[in-house]
Amino acid sequence: MADRRYVIVGNGFAGTTAAEQLRKADPACSIVLFADEPYCLYNRIALPPMLRLQVTEQKVIMRDMAWHEKLRIDLRLSTRVDRINVADQTVLAAGREEPYDALLVATGGRPNLATSPGAEGAQNVYNFQYMSDTKAISQALETAKVGVAVGGSFIAYELAEAFVSRNVETHWLIRGPRFLRRMLDEAAGELLHDAARADGVHLHFGEEVREFVRSNGAVTKVVTTTGETIDTDLVGIGLGLTINTELCEGTGIATRTGIVTDEHLETDVAGIFSAGDCAEFYDPIAEQHYRMGTWNSAGAHGKLAAHNMAVHGVEGAERKMFDVVPEYSSLVFSGQTITQFGLSPEYRDDIETEVSVDADKMWYRALYFLEDRFVGAVLIGKGNRAGKRRYLDAIKTKARFPKPDRRALLDWTAE
């Protein structure tokens, strides 16, 4: 274990958590942490509240340089890693080779850009992924009267929510028939749409952008695919992510929808691990590979990757497996909430569903089953989280429920 060298590419929650855990596990090691942004770790799930002016930038920043220096983590800000040299166990960054005994690739993803005519180079068309995006959009919202959010994703929703919260007339263009159409059915979607309408959002379903009309470098109108024209002062784009897997090219590291790992978060190249949004990891509970871009999952990945990096190559040391049920919860505008955990139809098309809807309470509950095994759930509605712990335990224990017994689970509480 003497003089172990660890390199981490990406200082998001997964990468920075891994660096912290490595220091705890191995006080004598060296840790180099590469970041392509100019910021230390910040809380990405706090960016929407920051955009709504509910928290300050200081509250969003989670770590500073002094913290890294105290833990002797060599943080290289604004530094892209250009190449992994598997044979020599080094990475190349800023013209310098950095050796490693174990490497973590936690490169996340980058937002897809708008490609409709008029988008390229427009001053007021924004993606929403980074601190710099948040600052730019927030400044634009100070004077904007009308804003357009594009996409059926969580990012697009967060943009629409922020626009309307800042007293900007908000139009939300959704290509499909509903928000999160790959996961939610019509009943669930309508509850969330009602929350958007209640806050004053104008919803446009089955719409995409045909053209951005510009004047003096800025978009002034959005023309939709059905021919509708919307005057606007800014446009927010939420069209998904492209996962940053380019660093794996030519290394022998397998990639599909992300960087493929086993249940230990190790790739098929020994000593190289992946974590966070970019990892297509094997989940022994779900018994399949998938990606999960949530904050909780990133933190769990960082801890697991650090342990397995620290014991890599150590004779007799025990590796750990991924054992967390991924989950997330979010407010949806001012009147709704959504909680999702485990698998959903977004990940598999052979999942069977049991649903209950309480229109008066504005509650929705969907439970997901795969060959009688309970694998996930979506809970919508304020106060509609009773039984969550029992559900998580059932997923972890791979509990099975024949079809006649499934509807009873919809009434589970904490008892």
Image (tube, rainbow, N blue to C red):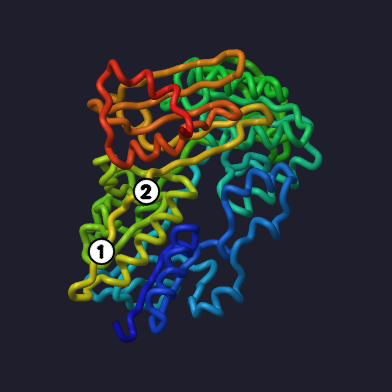
Label 2: state its secondary structure: loop
Where's residue 410, x and y in %? 42, 22
8 horizontally vs 311: left or right: right
**In the depicted view, which residue is nearer to us: 8 or 390?**
390
Q: Residue furthest right?
A: 143
Q: CA distance from mark 1 to mark 2?
A: 15 Å
Residue at numbered disc 2: 324
Which residue appears at 64% of the width and 43% of the height?
48
**In the depicted view, which residue is nearer to us: 3 or 125?**
3
**In the depicted view, which residue is nearer to us: 82 or 314?**
314
Indicate which disc, 1 or 2, sits on the residue closer to the N terminus.
1
Residue 377, located in which quarter of the rendered image?
Answer: top left
Residue kind at label 1, given as amino acid type: Arg
Q: Which mark is residue 319?
A: 1
In the rendered view, tell whether residue 35 sits above or below residue 75. Answer: above
**In the depicted view, which residue is nearer to us: 203 or 281?**
281
Q: Dot 1 surroundings within 10 Å: few (below 14), some, or many (20 or more)?
A: some
Q: Quadrant of the N terminus?
A: bottom left
